[in-house]
Image (cartoon, grey):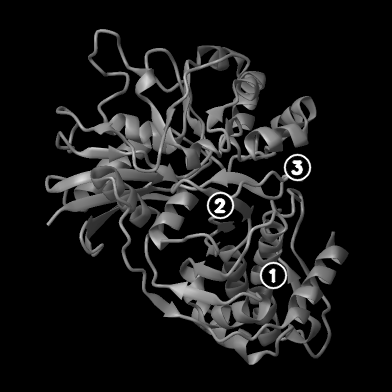
Amino acid sequence: MTLVAGVDSSTQSCKVVVRDLDTGAIVRTGRASHPDGTEVAPAAWWDALLTAIADAGGLDDVAAISIGGQQHGMVALDGEGNVVRDALLWNDTRSAQAALDLIEEAGAQALADGTGTVPVASITSTKLRWLRDAEPDNAARVAAVALPHDWLTWRLLGYGPEHESPSGPVLEALATDRSDASGTGYFDPVRNRYDRGVLELALGHDVVLPRVLGPSEAAGTTIDGVPGIPAGIVVGAGAGDNAGAALGLGATAGDVVVSIGTSGTVFAVSPTPTHDASGTVAGFASASGEFLPLIATLNAARILDVTAKLLGVDHDELGRLALAASPGAGGLALVPYFAGERTPNLPDATASLLGMTLANTTREGLARAAVEGLLCALADGLAAVQGQGVVAERLLLIGGAALNPAVQAVAAQVFAEPVVVPEPGEYVALGGAVQAGWALTGKRPTWPVPDVASPAPDHRPEILEAYRAAAARAR
């Protein structure tokens, strides 16, 4: 039996999944936590990766591995391979003004045409601009820039400041893939090349950037001397987390993934690129050779968390309460911008509860309004993606909240497209295993992904119409 491993190095934790190459069956798993915060020492990710690998029973019998990771994080390296400063993560918003500065200097349309993305605070280019403006001495030391998964792949291959090559740490050995590179703000996923002009506009000078590998290419193999990592394991190119999840789900053109985590994402595998000058839809690349137009919301499962806490119930009871209320919650609408919002781009917004009456201001009404607010916000994101010409034939609803019967039932009412709920799983890590198998054999594995629910279509367009009217009033 040939085994391959996939990794999800996410914001909160590192997960490792070991799969049987022939069947896709999960053989074993491991996990380790990451530090909290929006600024993290990359060494913590490396330690967590080694811990998660050990927790998964090690890699002695594993033939290939690939890492999916949180996108956009800035890992700045000096000429000796040392990390210049702690990495700024995607959710660090201190670079919001830097994003505006880049847009003003380069132009939104030019950035969208050249890179597929109009930068916001999450994008790597804005973090480099912040570094240039706020910490010029650190910026001047930067000799290479990597993303979290790039840096971990590099470490798996034996590189780093302790590398014993006569030439020192080989920055040119850094490698990435199109999906993660497309989230930097200085990579063109259509022409498959870096835009050095945007990079220099951000950081102030040119640097080494990871070579961009194809979906089936290997970054190299592991070598002797890396603690806990046997030599000779094929290391795949890796991927950004959303692209990795699409691989793990087996998503193809026509599939749209609606992911309900702490934040939410809507993304689709598309054969054609997008160039949204409004900045709403990011024109990322997929990990399978296509494109991955994507929107992100700052508020998703946390909407249910705060409402359940307010009502003094768990998520199961919140769902039961929601299903006891009528569609539309009797006119009660929750515009759920508890943490500001990215789609629409309202970083200073707050949540609003509108349409309260004596009849609808009930526990059931509030629960229903919370579920509808969550899904309507994501439906607006789907509309933005479809506005870029993306065809949606079915929606794959994933994340812990997707298992709630109320979320499933309301999704079938809010979305016009058929909704499918795949079996719960660590889809980024599962996608990493797909990529590992692809790099090992040259053929993309096609493993089955069971569904656990397919709610009957019950489209109620009036729910989304009422939500949009409430959102317009709340701004």
Q: Residues within 10 Å of mark 1 (few under 14, many from 20)?
A: many
Total labels drawn? 3
Observer-side mark, 2 or 1, equals 2
Q: Where residue 369 appears, x then y in whole percent?
A: 70, 77
Is residue 161 found left or right of 182 in the rendered image? left
Badge 2 element: loop
Q: Tell me which numbered mark, 3 or 1, is placed earlier along the sequence.
A: 3
The residue that label 2 is drawn on is: 271
At 46% from the left and 81% from the top, the residue drawn is 453
Q: In this orientation, which residue lies closer to the viewer: 1 or 222?
A: 1
Q: Are the residues tagged 2 and 1 within 8 Å (C-beta)?
A: no
Seen in the picture, residue 393 relative to 204 is either above or below; the reply is below
Q: Position of residue 144 (x, y in %)?
A: 46, 20
Kindly identify which residue carries mark 1: 376
Give the distance between the C-alpha atoms of the residues marked 2 and 1, in whole angstroms. 26 Å
Pair 3/1: label in front: 3
Instruction: Give the alpha-carbon distance from disc 3 to disc 1, as whole Å.
Output: 23 Å
Amino acid type for the residue under numbered disc 3: Ala
Residue 43 at least partly seen: no
Image quadrant holding the N terminus, namely: bottom left
Relative height, residue 84 to residue 115 (above, below): above
Q: Hey, which residue is sitting farthest right in the picture?
A: 473
Q: Is residue 114 left or right of residue 194?
A: right
Secondary structure of the residue carrying numbered label 3: loop
Q: Quadrant of the C terminus?
A: bottom right
Q: Earlier in the sequence, mark 2 or mark 1?
A: 2
Question: Please, is residue 431 above or below residue 196 in the view?
Answer: below
Badge 1 element: helix
Label 3 vs 2, first from the N-terminus:
2
What number is the disc on residue 277? 3
Other residues around mark 2 within 10 Å, as few (<14) / some (14–19) / many (≥20): some
Q: In the picture shown, does residue 184 fall above or below 466?
A: above
